[in-house]
Image (spheres, rainbow, N blue to C red):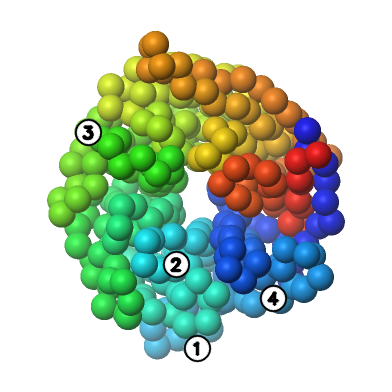
Amino acid sequence: MFHKEKSIQIKNSASALYNNLSVLRIAPRRLTYFTVVHANVVNMVSASWDGLNYSHRQLQSKEPNVATSTSLIMQAAFCVLPSRDLLVVSSQKGIQMYESDGSIMVYWHALDTPEAPTEQAVFARGISAVSDNYICVGVSSGAVLVFDVPSKGSNITLSEVLEEHKEAITDIAAECSGSQERLASLVTADDGGNVCVWKSGEEFQLLNKIPGLDITCSSVKLWKGTVLAGYGNGQIRLYEAVTGILHAEVNAHARWIYSLDVAPFSGLLLSAAEDSFVRVWHLAMTPETNSVEIAHLHNECVTDTQICGAKFCDGDGYAFAVTGYDLSEIIRYVQS
């Protein structure tokens, strides 16, 4: 069903972080941007669709009044809003927002770091655009910061702080199917496996809290009103977002899941884990019961590799890309 394409080389290897790959397709320019985090650097690659041209850029973690920052980057993710695309980088010191090509930093938000060292690490992790003008970023305290982003310029403001989680945020995702009538618009997950479902707006509203089982929920997606959650025990669970009803539970991987992704138009689901496997699943809505069914379609094994990022390169799931800990390449697969 899928076959391996030519890999894309990156300047540094990928760090072992959840969801350590982001992809942005620039259709008018026939380009795809990829970002992979290595320690305190974001590796960016711009790849032309014909596979002939690649350009590289590296973004350092920044902090005010410091020439070179050593603060570790936890995640880099593209945020697509109707009026603009931004690249958001979260680290131990704060949150940076760039134009999508990484050329200009438009916003910096410093994290509150305690004066005295504490046992709790401070960092930001979990990034998603939601609705027309918001970008949400999670922090290690369990808070979710909601930024209001204007259609252009750098007048980005912190509009709200959602304080429902008590443990560090792992991942955040917005409804990706494009349907406006869905009540749930955002899902947030934490280190304790708890998942919160939100309705976005002037004030974000908590719709549901799905309790964790003391197993980290490392990656989460929201598709057609269904929460797709990947866990440290290798399971994928499908919940109805608003009610929290469990529709399916799949023992998908032998080790910790690091990344989930959904191709919203085709209903393909990608899962990747420490067990070196990337699996492709198909999601289907059952109209009679209004529930989602999941079926296994395809496997790829990246031998001896702890996979830390996997993303579809388009909304149909025609191609996907994979990163692995200590690998200095992005591996690509395309439908046969």
What residue did someone put label 2 on?
85
How much space separates mark 4 and mark 2, taking CA atoms? 19 Å
Quadrant (top left, top right, bottom left, bottom right) of the N terminus: top right
> What residue is shown at x 22% (from left), y 55% (from top)?
161
What residue did someone put label 4 on?
56
The amino acid marked with disc number 3 is Leu
- For numbered disc 3, what is the local secondary structure? strand
How much space separates mark 3 and mark 1, taking CA atoms? 43 Å
Which percent across, then down, holds residue 158? 23, 65
The amino acid marked with disc number 1 is Ala
Front of the two marks 1 and 4: 4
- For numbered disc 4, what is the local secondary structure? strand
The amino acid marked with disc number 4 is His
Query: Viewer-proximal residue, 143 or 250?
Result: 250
Q: Earlier in the sequence, mark 3 or mark 1?
A: 1
Which percent across, then down, holds residue 117? 36, 63
What residue did someone put label 3 on?
207
Query: Viewer-proximal residue, 163 or 219?
Result: 219
The amino acid marked with disc number 2 is Asp
Query: Residue 302's image quarter?
Result: top right
How much space separates mark 2 and mark 1, taking CA atoms? 27 Å
> What residue is shown at x 76% (from left), y 45% (from top)?
334
In the drawing, what numbered circle is on residue 273?
A: none
